[in-house]
Image (cartoon, rainbow, N blue to C red):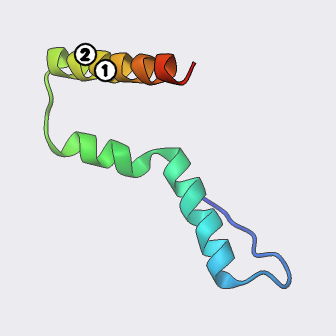
Amino acid sequence: MIIVNVKEGESLDRALKRFKKKFEKTGVLRELRSRQAYEKKSVTRRTQIKKAIYKQQLNQESV
């Protein structure tokens, strides 16, 4: 359960933004979407490898 204490004088929009950030970090929505459709382990592994290659290429370009 996510608890966000609203500080005195803080706007509700600001508190909502902090809540959204905390919720995003938990990864609940990502987990829910991944469970909606079954994905084979080989496909999951392939996507992870593609992501790693992409990140590595981005890292090499910036250096």
- Residue 1 visible in the picture: no
Instruction: Locate residue 36, reporting x and y percent.
Output: 18, 46
Q: Nearer the viewer, residue 10 or 32?
A: 10
> On the image, numbered disc 1 is attached to which residue?
48
Q: Residue at x 38, y 18 (%)?
A: 52
Q: Is residue 32 left or right of residue 15?
A: left
Q: Quadrant of residue 27?
A: top left
Q: For the residue carrying disc 1, how many other residues have a C-alpha within 10 Å: few (<14), some (14-19), or many (20+)?
A: few
Image quarter where the C terminus lies is top right
- Where 7 falls versus 20 (above or below)? below
Instruction: Locate residue 60, reporting x and y percent.
Output: 49, 16
> On the image, numbered disc 2 is attached to which residue?
45
Q: Residue at x 25, y 16 (%)?
A: 45
Q: Quadrant of residue 50?
A: top left
Q: Are marks 2 and 1 in contact (CB under 8 Å)?
A: yes
Determine the secondary structure under disc 2: helix
Q: Residue at x 60, y 73 (%)?
A: 16
- Residue 57 visible in the picture: yes
- Where 29 falls versus 63 (above or below)? below
Amino acid type assigned to the residue bearing label 1 in the image: Gln
Determine the secondary structure under disc 1: helix
Q: Is residue 56 left or right of residue 11?
A: left
- Where 43 falls versus 13 (above or below)? above
Instruction: Locate residue 61, reporting x and y percent.
Output: 47, 21
Amino acid type assigned to the residue bearing label 2 in the image: Arg
Q: Quadrant of residue 47?
A: top left
Q: Which mark is residue 25?
A: none
Number of on-image labels: 2
Residue at mark 2 to residue at mark 1: CA–CA distance: 5 Å
Image quarter where the N terminus lies is bottom right
Q: For the residue carrying disc 2, how many other residues have a C-alpha within 10 Å: few (<14), some (14-19), or many (20+)?
A: few
Q: Is residue 53 left or right of residue 3?
A: left
